[in-house]
Image: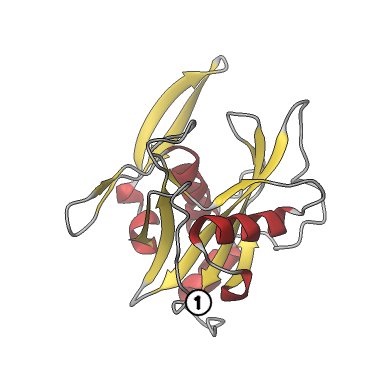
Amino acid sequence: MNFDSDPIITKLQAGLLPVKISDASDEIKREGQRGASVLMPLVYRDEWKVILTQRPQTMPSHAGQIAFPGGKREVGETAQKAALRETEEEVGLQAESITLIGRLPSFNAVGEYRITPFVGVVDPKAAIIPDQREVADVFETPLSFLMNPENHVARDVFFGGKDHRFYDMPYDEEDGTHRNIWGMTAMTMYRLYQRAYLGVFETDY
């Protein structure tokens, strides 16, 4: 895949950290926490799009939510390998069809995980085969929509004794299907927008 001179990829890479983690920032930060990884898969189909999944309504946690492929790290597994393994398990994309271009800072999720998000470019010819036990649907949303601040809907939440501002990215497909992109998935993309498009590099993760 030759995308080295693509201006969008160049912009994104300027806001991303190197794929290799050398500062142990992905390691757990509190007792009982577990490491996890996700992949933000990009694919070019006339324009850059983000591949997203929707979890089945039958899942015991986060039922019906929009998510990146990803999950918890296995014992002895690196954050990078976990992201690629989980992506293959959930949507059938093999590591050979993905070129990682960087990562976002690891962060503590509201639950028990410390999450490391990677960004990768997917070969457009690669087959997407979702595991129906974990994935009810796979869809693609234009990166231009997700990186447009006009589509970032602010939502204020009070927890942990503090006010927090989150951004949702509700998206309606051409066929009228509504996708409520929110929570960790939307905020991960918002952090990419901050870093790559605004040059805002937050350090409190």
What amino acid does circle 1 point to? Asp
Question: Residue 182, relative to residue 111: is it above or below?
Answer: below
**Within the image, what quadrant is residue 162 found in?**
top right
Write the residue at 45% across / 67% down. Answer: 128
Kindly tell me whether residue 164 is visible in this rendering. yes
Q: Residues within 10 Å of mark 1 (few under 14, many from 20)?
A: some
- Percent coordinates x, y for residue 16 in the rendering: 62, 60
- Location of mark 1 (residue): 123
Write the residue at 54% across / 73% down. Answer: 10
89 or 20: nearer the eye?
Answer: 89
Write the residue at 47% across / 66% down. Answer: 42
- Percent coordinates x, y for residue 27 in the rendering: 78, 42
* Residue at the outermost front position: 133
Write the residue at 39% across / 65% down. Answer: 49
Kindly tell me whether residue 205 is visible in this rendering. no
Query: In terms of secondary structure, where does tag 1 sit?
Result: loop
187 or 92: nearer the eye?
Answer: 92
Q: Quadrant of the N terminus?
A: bottom right
Question: Residue 153, relative to residue 93: is it above or below?
Answer: above
140 or 17: nearer the eye?
Answer: 140
Q: What colour scheme has been applied to the protein in the rendered image?
A: secondary structure
- Percent coordinates x, y for residue 78 in the rendering: 76, 54
- Percent coordinates x, y for residue 30 in the rendering: 76, 28
